[in-house]
Image (tube, helix red, strand yellow):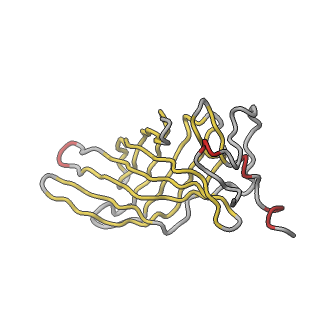
Amino acid sequence: MSATATTPPTSRLIRRLDGLEWPAAGAWQLPVGVSLDVHRTQRFRSRAIRVPIRGGTLVVDERGLHSTLDLHLAPTYPLAAGGLALRAVVTAADRSGTWIVSGSALVDDIDRPLVGSVRYCGVYRTGWRATAWLEVSLSVPRGHRGVPRLDMSGQLDALAPDLCVAPAFGSTEVASAGDRSSGCDLTGR
């Protein structure tokens, strides 16, 4: 069996909605083991820790906006003994691939606000599975009574859904695999 029979068509992995590039709609899994840099700032002290991801999902909405990013970070003392659970929703996007997000962070069983951005750098293929490359910059603002501020940053790869077939869009809205205007060429040429 050839490799092309098991891979989804590349023209469906990248699409354009209202002039903005988005990965195909669906649940893109975040592999376990990748780490984010987390800076914990409390009053005059700051500490940087690399925290591994225990799992997560980028769920890309068919309309692009309102897509969600769910991340579960491992428990790390003194950052968050109970771990971190982050849920961010895309509220705006620009032509450079930056998604403005807001949501909540569950830090040691306390729900706190979350703001930041996710930069979508495109979809590429390594082997049989396509991957969306993301740069994450998220913040949990400082809380009352000295609750620390948390700043998280790093690069994530989200694995394409197994059967990645985006819904049908008009031919003018979907970027083809060799479309140079999208900045991505997954055809291997």
Circle count: 0
Q: What residue is drawn where x is 67% and y is 45%?
A: 179
Q: What residue is drawn where x is 76% and y is 60%?
A: 7
Q: Quadrant of the N terminus?
A: bottom right
| 36 sits left or right of 31 in the view | left
Q: Residue furthest top?
A: 18
In the rendering, at what x and y percent does residue 84 appear? 40, 56
In the rendering, at what x and y percent does residue 51 appear? 38, 65
| 166 sits left or right of 123 in the view | right
- What is the quadrant of residue 129 in the picture? bottom right
Q: Residue furthest right?
A: 1
| Vertical position of residue 102 compared to residue 53: above or below | above
| Vertical position of residue 9 compared to residue 129: above or below | above
In the rendering, at what x and y percent does residue 5 appear? 84, 61
- Residue placed most toward the observer, 117 or 147: 117
Q: Quadrant of the C terminus?
A: bottom right
| 58 sits left or right of 153 in the view | right
In the rendering, at what x and y percent does residue 136 appear? 43, 52
| 123 sits left or right of 74 in the view | right
Q: What residue is drawn where x is 55% and y is 35%?
A: 66
- What is the quadrant of residue 101 in the picture? top left
| Vertical position of residue 171 compared to residue 11: above or below | above
